Image (tube, rainbow, N blue to C red):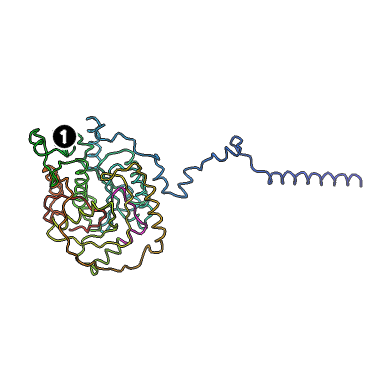
Amino acid sequence: MRGSGWGRFVRVVGVVVVLSVAWLQLSLAPLSHEPTAGVGAQESLEPDPSLLQRVNPIAKFLSLNNGKNQNTTQASSLNNEQIEEIKEQIQLRSGNETILNEELFGPVQQETVVIVVQVHDRLEYLRHLIVSLAQARDIDTVLLIFSHDVFDDEINKLVTTIDFCKVMQIFYPMSLQTHPREFPGEGPNDCTRNMNKEKAAYQGCIGDPDLYGHYREARFTQTKHHWWWKANKVFDDLWPLKNHTGLVLFLEEDHYVAEDFLHMLKLVYRTMPYACPKCHLITLGTYVKNLNYNADSRKYVSMACLKDKLFTMMLRGPRVFHIGDCGVHHKKKDCSSKIILNKVHRALHSAQRLLFPRQILVAHGTPKKVKKPKGNGGWGDQRDQALCRSFTFISGPSSPFATSQMQPLESSNSLSITVKKRV
C-alpha cells in the first residue's frame, strides 16, 4: 500500500509540473529574436513598406524616391554631350512606340478611351494625378499616354511603375531641354521680351513682336508648341492608334480626377447626339479664376480662328480639378499641393452620393453676344508660327484640326477637353 501510494504521489506531482510549464508557456509573451526593446525603441519601429503597399497599393506612387526630381534636366545646365544623349533616348523611345502592360490589359481597340497627359517637370503634382487615376473605376480599360517636354529619369521611373492600365510615353522633340541655345529655345541673337522696335532694328536681333509689342519668351511658346504637336501626334502619327476611333481626353500633370470621371465621360458622350448634336467637345473641368488664361484661349480660337464655332458640353459638377498653384504662368513661395488637394478631397467626399449617376440632365445655356476676345500675346514670332504649322503638315492632312482652316494664333491650349477623332 505504501509503495502504491508513493507511486501515485509521484505521478500527481509530475502532472502538476507539466501543467505548470504549459501554463507558463501560454501566459508569457513569446521572446523576440530582436534585441531587447524598451518603450522608446518600440515607438521608433516603422511598418514594413511592403505591408503598407499590400493595404494601399497606390502608396508606391507617392513614396517612390519621396522627393523632387533631382536630375540636372535644366536646359542651361546641360552640355552638348548630355543633350545629344537625351536626343538619342527620345528618338529611340519614340521609334519603338512601346505600350507597357499590354500583356496584362490587352491591345488597344478602336473604341479604347485614350488619356493624354502633358508633362513638364512638376513631379509632385504628377504623383497625385497618377494616384487619382489609379482609383478611378474602369481605368484598366484605357490607354494612358504621357507626353513629355523634359526627359527626366525620376519622372520616367514613376511612369513605368504604373501597373493599373496600358501606358505609353511620347517625347516632344523640339523642347527647350534639347534646344537650349537655339530656336525654339532662346538663341544668342534673339530679341529680348521688352526690347522696343527701334532698339531691335538697331541691334539687328531676331524676332517679331506680338500684338502687345513684346518679343517671344521660349518657356511660354513651348507649352503651346508641345500641346499642338501632341494633339497631331496622337491623332495622326502613332501606329498603335492607326485604327482608333474612340475618345481622346487631354489632361495635364497638375490635374486630379474624380473616381467616376470615366463614367461621366462615357455618359455625356452617349447623351451628346440627341442632347447637343452641334457639340464638339466635352469639358470635365470648370473655369476657375486661375485658369482664365486657358479659358480665354479656347474662346479666342473658337471665335477668331475656326470657320465653325466650337460648342462644348460642360459638367456642372467637375470631375477634373486643377491642383497646380505653381507652373509656367504662376509662381508662389509655397508650391505645395497639400492645401488645394485637401480642398479637392473634401469636395469629393461631400459629393460622394452624387458620383456615378445613372443619367444626366442637360440644360442649354442662353446664347450671349460676346465681343471677340483679344489674344494673350506671345505668338508674334514668325518662326513660332511656322513651327506650329509644320506639326500639322508633318502629321498629315487627316488631322481633325488641319481641316478647320486655322489662322496664325495668339492662343494656348484649353483646360481638359475630349475630342472625338475624325476618320
| x and y, in percent, of residue 110 in the image | 25, 58
Magenta region: 252-264
Q: Residue at x 13, y 33 (%)?
A: 189
Magenta stretch encompasses residue 6: no
| x and y, in percent, of residue 416 in the image | 26, 54
Magenta stretch encompasses residue 255: yes
Q: Residue at x 27, y 35 (%)?
A: 74
| Extreme residue toward the right, this view | 1
Disc 1 element: loop
Side of 401 where 270 appears, left or right: right
Side of 187 where 157 appears, left or right: right
| x and y, in percent, of residue 291 in the image | 27, 52
Q: Is disc 1 surrounded by few (<14), some (14 to 19) or many (20+) residues within 10 Å?
A: some
The mark total stands at 1
Q: Quadrant of residue 149?
A: top left
| x and y, in percent, of residue 246 in the image | 24, 58
User: Is residue 350 positioned above or below 327 on the image?
Assistant: below
Q: Residue at x 29, y 57 (%)?
A: 286
**Nearer-the-camera pick, 418 or 301:** 301
Side of 391 where 162 appears, left or right: right
The disc labelled 1 sits on which kind of residue? Gly
Q: Quadrant of the C terminus?
A: bottom left
User: Is residue 360 positioned above or below 412 on the image?
Assistant: below
User: Is residue 287 positioned above or below 43 on the image?
Assistant: below
Q: Residue at x 10, y 43 (%)?
A: 382
**Nearer-the-camera pick, 70 or 206:** 206
Q: Which residue is mark 1?
A: 187
